[in-house]
Structure formats: C-alpha cells, structure tokens
Image (cartoon, helix red, strand yellow):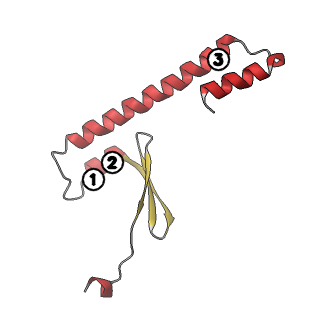
Amino acid sequence: MSLLEKQRTLKRCPKIGFTTTLVRTIWMAETANQDSRMARTLELEAILEAQDGNILEFSEDLYTSIIEKIVVKECTTLEFHLKYGLRFEEHYTLKRSRDLI
C-alpha cells in the first residue's frame, strides 16, 4: 500500500485516532527502505563494474559476493535472489545431447 493510500485510509477512519505523526513515521520508513535499496543497488553495480567487462568464466568470489540463493521454480525456470534484495527469473530451454549434435 502506498503512502497516499495509507493517508486516504486514515482519513476515512477518524475514530481510530491516528495522528500526523503516524503518517510521518510511515513515510520515513518507506523513504529509508527506498534509500537502502538504492544503496544496495549501487553497491552491486560497483562490484559488477570492477569485473572489467564481460564475465567469461565462473568466479566463486563474485558468486559468493552477489548471490544469496537460487530457487528452482520449474524445470526451466530459476529465480536468482541477490544479497542486495534484488530478484530476477531466468528461463532457459533444456537441450538433450542429441539436440547439440
């Protein structure tokens, strides 16, 4: 729920007794969360930029500094959870040995 939606809810429920302080606290928490995400994203960007271009082979150091876990969602879908709070899905096609010939 966005801050604007929370404010509308509070205005519709005056009997609850919420104050402007609560709205300000919610806004500050959301802003801090956004700032934290931005900082984590910039840190991830710095790590990747330090790799000097394309990554041509597996690097355990890079892997352990970025990846929190990998979740197998389906046979051809992986979800990568990065240590910086980011997530993305990767879809791929299964290839059998006879398909590679």
Give coordinates of residue 71: x percent, y percent: 48, 58
Neighbour tally class for label 3: few under 14, some 14-19, many 20 plus, Cα within 10 Å: some
Residue type at the position of mark 1:
Glu
Give coordinates of residue 75: x percent, y percent: 48, 71
Give coordinates of residue 97: x percent, y percent: 31, 84
Q: CA distance from mark 2 to mark 1?
A: 6 Å
1 or 3: mark nearer the eye: 3
Tell me, yes or no, whether the two marked residues, 2 and 1, touch with CB atoms within 8 Å: yes
Q: CA distance from mark 2 to mark 3?
A: 39 Å
Does residue 78 sit above or below 64 in this rendering?
below
> For the point 41% across and 42% down, which residue is it?
83
Q: Quarter holding the N terminus? A: top right
Q: Which of the marked residues, 1 or 3, is nearer the chain's N terminus?
A: 3
Residue type at the position of mark 3:
Val
Q: Which residue is mark 2?
A: 64
Residue type at the position of mark 2:
Thr
> For the point 70% across and 24% down, which residue is it?
8
Taking the image as shown, residue 74 lies to the left or right of residue 18, namely left
> For the point 27% across and 53% down, which residue is it?
60
Q: CA distance from mark 1 to mark 3?
A: 45 Å
Residue 60's label in the rendered image is 1
Q: Which residue is mark 3?
A: 23
